[in-house]
Image (tube, rainbow, N blue to C red):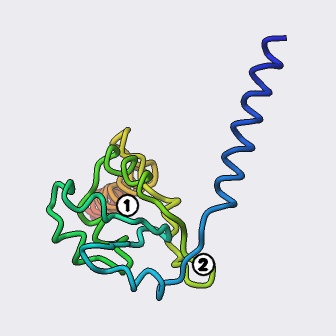
Amino acid sequence: MATKDVKDVKDVKDDTAVAAASESKLYTRAEVAKHADPKDTWIIIHNNVYDVTPFLNEHPGGEEVLLEQGGTDASEPFEDIGHSTDARQMMESYKIGELIEEERTGDSGKKDRDWSSGTNDEDNSSSWRSWLIPIALGVLATLVYRYFISAH
């Protein structure tokens, strides 16, 4: 019986999350561009629209950083800084909607790094592969050299 109750609670949470996601307000880039002043500042990060006006005075980098990006897509500058997991969680409270489907970029933020673990599987596999080729070439060159030296 307790298992069924837990499952029902989970279903309710899942349904609530789906409903919240489907009710997300959609904006165009032109609409976001109208909100680029200190009294009303919106930015786009990974196709999501954020009203950062209440956060201007609290931003650790200063309000100028946010005002500079106001009304525009700030995804690249946001990622260039390397914001923490806490910052990424905090920004969710300022989310007011998403870009309309036609104006979204290919980078939806779905490939965000897992900053909590400090590693990324794609980067690790690429890293060891970058060492594998030179090592293999070195071994091959050594074998070829030894073969020709011992043959002559």
User: Looking at the picture, how far across and down is residue 114, in whole percent?
Assistant: 42, 46
In the image, residue 84 sits, relative to residue 147, either above or below, namely above
Image position of 115 (left or right of 121):
left
User: Looking at the picture, how far across and down is residue 94, in whole percent?
Assistant: 41, 57
Q: Quadrant of residue 13?
A: top right
User: Looking at the picture, how far across and down is residue 51, in whole percent?
Assistant: 39, 66
**For mark 2, does the 10 Å Cα neighbourhood hold few (<14), some (14 to 19), or many (20 or more) residues?**
some
Q: Quadrant of residue 104?
A: bottom right
Does residue 12 appear anywhere in the picture?
yes
Q: Residue furthest top?
A: 1
Residue beneath the point at 14% across and 62% down: 62
In the image, residue 116 sits, relative to residue 136, either above or below, namely above
What's the mark number on residue 69?
none
Residue designated by label 1: 133
Residue designated by label 2: 100
Q: Nearer the viewer, mark 1 or mark 2?
A: 2
Q: Nearer the viewer, residue 14 or 115?
A: 14
Q: Nearer the viewer, residue 55 or 86?
A: 55
Does residue 150 appear anywhere in the picture?
no
Badge 1 element: helix
Distance CA(mark 1)–CA(mark 2): 44 Å
Q: Quadrant of residue 21?
A: bottom right
Q: Quadrant of the C terminus?
A: bottom left
Image position of 111 (left or right of 67):
right
Q: Residue furthest front?
A: 39
Circles 1 and 2: CB atoms closer than 8 Å: no
Counting labels gives 2
Q: Which mark sits nearer the N-terminus, 1 or 2?
A: 2
User: Looking at the picture, how far across and down is residue 109, in whole percent?
Assistant: 48, 63
Residue beneath the point at 28% across and 58% down: 55
Amino acid at the residue labelled 2: Ile
Q: Nearer the viewer, residue 93 or 77?
A: 93
